[in-house]
Amino acid sequence: MRAHLKAGLATAAVLAALLAGCASAPPPPARLGLKLAPAALGQSISVQQHLKVERAGRTDDLDVALQVEPDAVDVVGLAFGQRVLSLHYDGKDVKEWRHVMLPRQVRAEDVLEDMQLTLWPAEAVAQALPEGWRIAEQGLHRTLYLHDEPIMEIAYSGTPRWSGTVVLDNLRYKYRLTIQFAPNE
């Protein structure tokens, strides 16, 4: 009986150690927090996009109207024809409206950051990156690094960057964002 109790306590100790290890796993690193001036894009654009986000076996779609002027970025997101997100960024503050059904994981700051990392010139992004971060661009491919570890890869189907299809692979947060731009008429 005593041996059985000892084995049970040892098993409980191992389980407790495993659970403690899971509980004390470091939280995922914070997002970059990039907020570039709207004018840093270098021109005004008004485009329509279809976004497809793939993460952990799930796919979500969103239609987006994006307008960038020298003094502001405005985004309206629609799902099933209903507005689910509005974002206004004046170069200082991000203001958002969100539908109650929009998952809380979808944050306006993250949408703005992915948009700027994808569309703004690499030189403008490079100037705003904190220490340890860098961006490399070669042809129709862009990679964002932290201490020489690739964090994000972006592939463009053509130029300008806001035409055709753009695929952003976020290696840190393990999601893929595919942006299909509607042709300008």
Image (cartoon, rainbow, N blue to C red):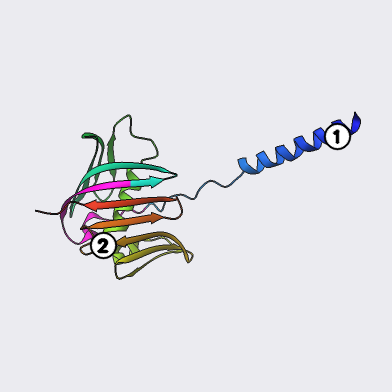
Magenta residues, as a range? Answer: 34-52
Q: As drawn, which residue projects farthest toward the front? A: 57
Is 49 covered by the magenta stretch? yes
Contact between marks 1 and 2 (CB within 8 A): the answer is: no
Depth-wise, is mark 1 or mark 2 nearer the camera?
A: 2
| 93 left or right of 54 in image | left
Crowdedness near tag 1: few (<14), some (14–19) or many (≥20) residues, C-alpha within 10 Å: few
Determine which of the numbered discs, if any, sits on residue 157 in the image: 2
Q: CA distance from mark 1 to mark 2?
A: 64 Å
| 12 left or right of 150 in image | right
Q: As drawn, which residue projects farthest toward the bottom? A: 138
Quadrant showing the N terminus: top right
Secondary element at image label 2:
loop
| 48 left or right of 2 in image | left
Q: Position of residue 75 (x, y in %)?
A: 23, 44
Amino acid identity at mark 2: Ser
Q: Position of residue 183 (x, y in %)?
A: 15, 54
User: Between disc 1 and disc 2, whose residue precedes?
Assistant: 1
Amino acid identity at mark 1: Lys
| Location of residue 149 with respect to 116 vertically, above or below | below
Name which residue lies at 24% across and 61% down: 161
Is 132 covered by the magenta stretch? no
Residue named by callout 1: 6
Q: Please identify the quarter of the rendering in which residue 104 is found.
A: top left
Name which residue lies at 35% across and 54% down: 34
Q: Please identify the quarter of the rendering in which residue 158 is found.
A: bottom left
Q: Position of residue 172 (x, y in %)?
A: 46, 53
Q: Position of residue 92 (x, y in %)?
A: 28, 49
